[in-house]
Amino acid sequence: MGRIPAAIFLALAPLGFGVAALALGMDANWDLRNYHYYNAYAWLTGREGYDILAAQAPTFFNPLIDVPFFLATQAWPARLVGFLLGTLQGLNALPLYGIAYAALDIAEQRRRRLLAAALALLGMVGVGNLSELGTTFYDNVVSLGPLTSLWLILRRHHALLGGSWREIWRSLLLAGLISGIAIGLKQTIVTLPLGLAIAFLLAPTSLRRRLGLAFLYGIGVTLGMALSAGPWMLHLWQAYGNPLFPFYNQLFKSPWGLPEDYRQFFYIPGGVWTRIFFPFAYLRDPHLAAEVDFRDLRILACFVLVPLAVLAAGVRAIQRRSGAVGRDTRGLFLPAQSRYVLVAFAVGYAIWVAIFCIYRYIVVYEMLAPLAIALAIDRLPLAARARALLTAAVLALVVVTMKPADWLRAPWSERWVSAVAPKLADPDHAIVLITGHEPLSYLIPFFPPAVRFLRIHSGFTGPYEPAVRFNVEMHSIVARQRGPLFVLYNPNEAAFAETHLAAYRLAIDKRACQLVPSNIGYLPYLFCRLQRTDDR
């Protein structure tokens, strides 16, 4: 591949994924309906603290990442927004190309560019990334941060290991800054930046330089996080006494939550062996790692091949010390760069298994997996032709066995989110209670701004947890309310609604109910007047 074809590939690849996002349909996933739309609206309109727990636990997530999408949907047609979002996510192909190009040890530039483009494209067609194209999960948006950092590190890897500090400190700070900004926007991307930092500590250079590299990169990460998340974390600290609220509240002991870490919101499979062999476990049961069915073997392939590459490296080291001559394993990739990528990949994966186990949060590893597979096989004690054939066979197997995931999409409409709210006689004094687990906060922007929303029950808390200050506050607000009271809920969760409203001494007036239809909901939701049971 010549320089011009490579440039054309890099220019057209993001646009191609923008088109693919349009072909897949309009995103209507659970998280979009629960908080990605509402959080930006609440932050931009100052509703934080006015509504209470409207988006359940994600009410407290950094809203900054959601603002561009919300503003775009207010200004532009849904298809244009979808194309732009898919194109943004398609930009991951650029650092993937740069990472592969920097790792390859091929003098002939056409071949080097071709292999880099192939590995980048294979990295972009995993089930995680494809299923998230044009969606608001943003795992394949924040991935741009650590991938770009890795590209910057590999570009100057030789200088980092042996050059003067004057040459490299700006590069390291910049790489860390980019990763830190991504972490601040969505903390679940933290695993790869941690892997990049720890990989410095295992680099083939002096201890002093290893510590210095990790330190400078860490300073950059800290600065990046301060830029993108510092103000929001300060707000959480001032409002709730926990800068990560509600998570790790067993450490901060905020009275607004229980003294626990709230990790039940994540998929945490039980059993040591399940964790150790997790790629096999979620291959057998995808619901261990996601809410939907899917299949992609690339992480499993890395799980098998990377340890084999480490074992081969150990054998070679023993042979060198003993003076034995083993097979020449010089291959397509630079050894130092290969080592750095594989260590960062393995360490980051181990952290992901330890704290998350949600497949969406490993999309960035899915993107790097074709390169990691090629790097691992390249270090095996096989003939060059055998290594090439094995790499091609594994990557082909990964592609042909994929089973795409479906996070729920809707037919394209003029506006991405639309709903018809009931007309209220006295909206300035109305309070609407939300109950159940259904994501309903995306409907709030279609109500008059004066209407206040309180979610009295959700996966985060409910009336049965009086130790959580939110429940005390909501009980007080409802008790003082003299204007109209309503409830918004999923009719399939009627039993939840009645049970938790009873704790507030309220009952649904089923003669005064209306439907609230929307273009991305499963079904029309019920909006009903409430009666106080004390008044009966």
Image (spheres, rainbow, N blue to C red):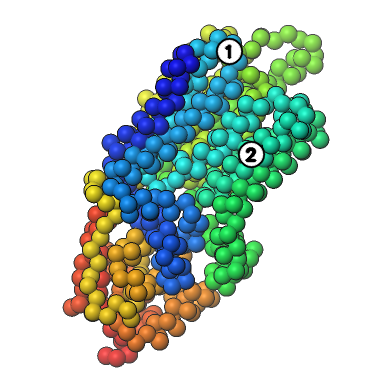
Image position of 139 with respect to 5: above or below: below
Report which residue position mark 2 lands on. 174
- Looking at the image, tell me whether mark 2 or mark 1 is earlier in sequence order: 1
Which amino acid, mark 1?
A: Ile
Q: Residue 448 versus residue 441: which sits nearer the camera?
A: 448
Where residue 384 appears, x then y in whole percent? 57, 9
The disc label shown at residue 410, or none:
none
Q: Residue at x 48, y 38 (%)?
A: 363
Report which residue position mark 1 lands on. 106
How far is mark 2 from mark 1, CA to CA?
A: 28 Å
Q: Residue at x 54, y 12 (%)?
A: 109
Q: Residue at x 25, y 67 (%)?
A: 421
Q: Is residue 149 visible?
A: yes
Where residue 398 appears, x then y in whole percent? 43, 26
Quarter of the figure that contains the C terminus: bottom left
SS label for mark 2: helix
